[in-house]
Image: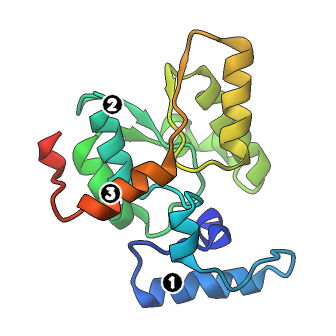
Amino acid sequence: MDMLAFSGCNHGLNPEEAEELKRMRYAYPWWRDKEIDSKTKRSEGLCPLTPEETSLVLKALGFEKDTLIYIAAGEIYGGEKRLKPLRAAFPKLVRKEMLLDSEPLRQFQNHSSQMAALDFIVSTASDVFLPTFDGNMAKLVEGHRRYLYSKISSYKNNQIAFQDIVCTYSHHLQQDSY
């Protein structure tokens, strides 16, 4: 949720949700940018892929519906409602909270850096890594995977090209067409 507010990207959100993210930006005085033009950021490829766009990319890359997908992230803005298109395409979505028992996880829960470290460990050891946002975590994971495992697949999205295609053809794209 913080990442979405920080990025200033509100594609697919209603006006109330966009305003909520804007208020969140103002709540953090150390975040430099408060007024952000979401359309410009998106046209420059600086926005994360939406769950629907992520499902289209995974399908286009040939991933099957029964593929186990680990979501390396904190709280998703909009929760399960926002993840619905991705879960419909790939029902085997898991998060760290689902993989660890509550007792071992409890020691990490109030420490966002430690929670991110758990995501880092899973992401670097995964068969495939597909970031939906080109932030620091994605860069760190990609670099570490290249250093340790040169043969493991990591995908670097050309978000500008993909978002242009999705925006141009979104009324023609059907999830079932892949």
Number of on-image labels:
3
Picture disc at residue 31: none
Residue found 18% across the figure and 49% down from its top: 175
Q: Is residue 11 left or right of residue 21?
A: left
Q: Is residue 107 visible?
A: no
Q: Are marks 2 and 3 in contact (CB under 8 Å)?
A: no
Q: Is residue 18 left or right of residue 30?
A: left
Mark earlier in primary sequence (1, 2): 1
Residue found 60% across the figure and 20% down from its top: 125
Q: Nearer the viewer, mark 3 or mark 1?
A: 3
- Residue 44 versus residue 4: which sits nearer the camera? 44
Spatial separation of the CA atoms under disc 1 and disc 2: 31 Å
* Picture quadrant of residue 58: top left
Label 3: how many Cα within 10 Å (few below 14, some 14–19, many 20+): some
Spatial separation of the CA atoms under disc 2 and disc 3: 15 Å
Q: Amino acid at mark 1?
A: Ala
Q: What x and y, as percent, mark residue 50? A: 42, 58
Q: Is residue 138 left or right of residue 160?
A: right
Mark earlier in primary sequence (3, 1): 1
Q: Secondary structure at mark 2?
A: loop
From this view, report whether residue 130 is shown above or below residue 158. above
Q: Amino acid at mark 3?
A: Val
Residue under label 1: 18
Q: Amino acid at mark 2?
A: Leu
* Picture quadrant of residue 139: top right
Q: How is the image coloured?
A: rainbow
Residue under label 3: 166
Q: Secondary structure at mark 3?
A: helix
Q: Quadrant of the C terminus?
A: top left
Residue under label 2: 61
Q: Residue furthest left?
A: 176
